[in-house]
Amino acid sequence: MDLPRTPGTVTDPSPLPRLRSPHLVLVFLAVVTTVAGSVIGLWVVPPDAMQGDVQRLMYLHVPAAWLAFLAFFVVFVMSVLYLIQRDPRWDLLAASSAEVGVLFTALTLVLGSLWGKPIWGVWWTWDPRLTTTAILLVIYVGYLAVRSFAADPERAARWSAVVGIVGFADVPIVYLSVTWWRSLHQPPSSPQSMASSMLWTLMLNLVAFTLVYAYLLLRRYQVAVAEQELDARRAEV
């Protein structure tokens, strides 16, 4: 989905600064940790005593959910900064993070369904955790839709910033849903409820997903800046 081309302010007509290209070290670390976390999670650590091998989905499902939260937190912070400063950098970073966050949220729901079928006997149920997560996905798809359909780029940036700020309120609701309501979904895991080998594998995959998120965010921002510069050149012709 293309990001809108938000012009700079009148007082700051300079072009948008570019972020440095994602360094090869970042790419290398993302690949290594992702492969290592997947191999260890699938074949090294033992299966769960109650859920068996299906529990191995936790090493992907939980990091995907946490990175969705992180992505939307970045949207929240960048949206606040944009409304205060009207700096198009913050707007483009917010939009870039929202796209990556939608990807991680969709992945969370898919992995959760794969986990839920053998454990709960259904692919989907209107459990509070699942329902609030689905609402979160709809909110940020709506965020991207606002950016695409608003005719004026500056207005699109302002409206989407408001959606990004208000929509973030659903993140703590998703997290606390298993505490606030009776739920099929298991409560959050803790170091006390997990074997150390499982905990360290989960942490490794969390690091891997964070590196992947950082790479995708930087790349999407670079594409957004390039799109804006191309539109500016076309306007000059």
Image: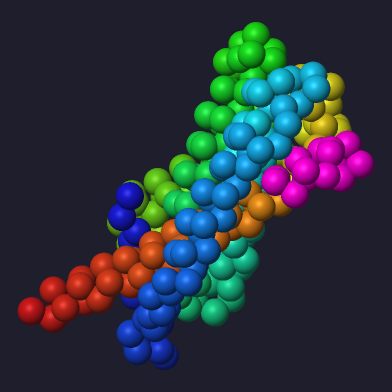
Task: Measuring from the top left, give residue 128's x and y in whole percent.
Answer: 72, 26
Q: Image quarter for residue 234?
A: bottom left
- What residue appears at the point 88 percent right and 36 percent down from the top-left corner? 193
Query: Position of 31 compared to 118: left or right?
Result: left
**Residue 196 part of the magenta-drawn span:** yes
Query: Position of 176 compared to 150: left or right?
Result: right
Q: Relative to the observer, which residue lies in front, 109 or 162? A: 109
Q: Taking the image as drawn, is residue 157 in sight?
A: no
**Residue 231 part of the magenta-drawn span:** no
- What residue appears at the point 54 percent right and 79 percent down from the top-left corner? 85
Q: Taking the image as drawn, is residue 77 in sight?
A: yes
Task: Measuring from the top left, give residue 67's x and y in whole percent.
Answer: 61, 51
- What residue appears at the point 56 percent right and 42 percent down from the top-left corner? 38
Task: Measuring from the top left, give residue 104's x and y in whole percent.
Answer: 53, 44
Q: Image quarter for residue 180?
A: top right
Q: Relative to the observer, which residue lies in front, 36 or 116? A: 36
Most extreme residue toward the left is 237
Q: Is residue 171 above or below residue 3?
A: above
Task: Measuring from the top left, give residue 169's x and y in whole percent.
Answer: 69, 48
Q: Image quarter for residue 17?
A: bottom left
Question: Which region is colored magenta?
Answer: 189-202
Q: Is residue 38 above or below residue 47?
A: below
Q: Relative to the observer, which residue lies in front, 185 or 52? A: 52
Query: Position of 76 compared to 222: left or right?
Result: right
Image quadrant where one finds the C terminus: bottom left
Most extreme residue toward the front is 44
